[in-house]
Image (cartoon, rainbow, N blue to C red):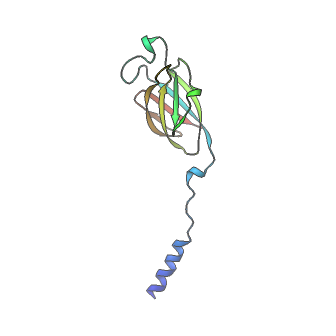
Amino acid sequence: MKIAMLSVLTLGLAFSPSPTPSSSQASASINVKIMMNSRKPNGKPWDGFGAGGPDPFVIVDGQSYRGDRCQDSFVCNIRVSSSDDAMLIEVRDADMQFDDRAGSTTCAVGYVCETSGATIALSR
């Protein structure tokens, strides 16, 4: 009797559907609002000699949006595509030779998150 019940339970588990992973969902357009700190994390101005503001852009889950950067702006909005609500975001300041890193964080749609050099807010 116990063996028969165990086999019924085993069969029930074997045929239960598995959840669909979020990566199979369609990509959605998400707005990343970048609010750069007044200075780099090391305390220096974003541009050499304090000549202008930063040129912020993001890298989202390994995908660079450098081409969508804002120029000489402490606040920037960039549209990105993602199939997940939470994503790894790296904030950078585009420069002629070497981009300056403004930090990275994992953030989700509907939240405001901070890095060492910027604050970001994600919305649909």
State left or right for residue 28 relative to residue 87: right
Q: Is residue 69 above or below residue 45?
A: below
Number of marks present in the image shown: 0
State left or right for residue 36 relative to residue 26: left
State left or right for residue 80 relative to residue 97: right
* Residue at x 55%, y 63% (from the top left corner): 18
Report the quarter where the C terminus lies: top right
In this rendered view, identify the residue nearer to me: 107 or 94: 94
State left or right for residue 85 relative to residue 43: right
In this rendered view, identify the residue nearer to me: 15 or 112: 15
Q: Position of residue 44 (x, y in %)?
A: 38, 17
Q: Is residue 15 above or below residue 37?
A: below
Q: Residue furthest bottom?
A: 1
Q: Position of residue 13 (x, y in %)?
A: 51, 72
* Residue at x 55%, y 54% (from the top left corner): 21
Q: Is residue 74 above or below residue 32?
A: above
Q: Residue furthest front?
A: 97
Q: Residue furthest left?
A: 42
Q: Position of residue 67 (x, y in %)?
A: 59, 27
Q: Is residue 118 above or below residue 61?
A: above
* Residue at x 46%, y 16% (from the top left corner): 47
Q: Position of residue 53 (x, y in %)?
A: 49, 16
* Residue at x 55%, y 60% (from the top left corner): 19
